[in-house]
Amino acid sequence: MSKALLQNEVIILDELDRQIIQATQSGLPLVPRPYHHVAEDLGVTVKEVIRRMKAMKDTGIIRRIAAVPNHYALGYKGNGMTVWDVPSELVNDLGHKVGVLDFVSHCYHRPRFLPDWPYNLFAMVHAHNRKEALLLVDTIAELLGKHDRGHDVLFSKQILKKTGMRLL
Amino acid sequence: MQSLTDIEKHVLNDFQHDFPLVARPYQALAEKLGTSEEIIIETLNKLKQEGFVSRVGAVFRANSIGASTLAAMSVPEQEIEAIAKKINAYSEVNHNYKREHHFNLWFVLTASNEHELNAVLDDIEQETGYPVMYLPMIEDFHIDLGFDLDFNSNYDVESAN
């Protein structure tokens, strides 16, 4: 099944899947056998942990497993949430075009909230500084062309809270 | 200011989307980089301690579990700290950023279902006295392949600590 088909469907996770998510979301232990560690905590075999994680990766629940870099610490200080007002009937096509740009880390269609908020396409851009970030905004604007009916960039000033996803 | 070693750069950049799902993943990384498991673990520990890596682990798709939404509020500058504190006290809030905009507080809420999510939104409005604009994701366009870090530019890299 393709990941796209899963977009708005509910994926059923069982208790063990949830436990694995809970045990790994804040990070894998930095020991030679990290999945063994997880398996032992949950009282299952390491084979089962790896099998479940592979399955969640295949269905797109796990996007990737990685050393997650802290962009800010690495010198990426121009982190902007760019927001765009594009025609509703084109938002899917345009979203896919923006989503593949290598400097965009997240790209979402969200509802407008009128009259306060006319923007329906969100793209996070990461650059070394603001000046560079604004050039990336220009690149997106060019790509959208006449379909860009208005846009804005919201730079983050301060991280007030950042934790992993809360589990149910 | 400090610079990253070659091994640190590779560890950061090369495995953003295919960290191995095998019994000894750090050993597998070591083989690809021509080094030892011990050095990989040591490097990751150091990167974590210095704040360059927030964690080594799974990145879960937004909205794959329960219900979530991006939410924003417009609050007076002098009240922002106090209001952020109230919002952050909710365990349903996992990210909260101050942004330069009329809407200056942006946070992400996750709950087990939509009903609970709406209850928390109502609660936050009541407790802070300001309306919440909520913008749940409709579609995710990004194919998340990680982020190609540009180490060739002469920008300052400094410790986050």
Image: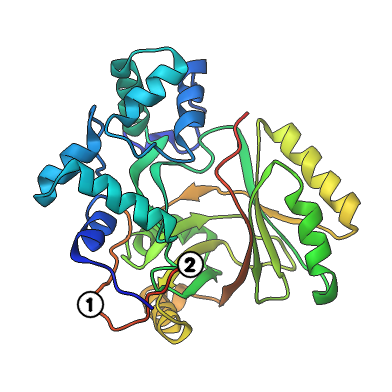
Asked whether the beta carbons under mark 1 and mark 2 sit within 8 Å of each other, the answer is no
The 10 Å Cα crowd at callout 2, few under 14, some 14 to 19, many 20 or more, is some
Is A19 situated left or right of A52 in this image? Answer: right
Residue B130 at what x, y percent from top left? 86, 60
Residue B73, compared with residue B22, is above or below; it is below
Residue A65 at what x, y percent from top left? 34, 41
Residue B85: quarter of image: bottom right
Q: How is the image coloured?
A: rainbow
Q: Is residue B144 visible?
A: no
Q: Is residue B41 visible?
A: yes
Pointer 2 chain: B
Q: CA distance from mark 1 to mark 2?
A: 20 Å
| Residue type of the residue flagged with mark 2 | Ala
Residue B160 image label: 2
The 10 Å Cα crowd at callout 1, few under 14, some 14 to 19, many 20 or more, is few
Is A158 situated left or right of A58 in this image? Answer: right
Q: Which residue is mark 1?
A: B152
Residue A106: quarter of image: bottom left
Secondary structure beneath dot 1 equals loop
Residue B34 image label: none
Pointer 1 chain: B
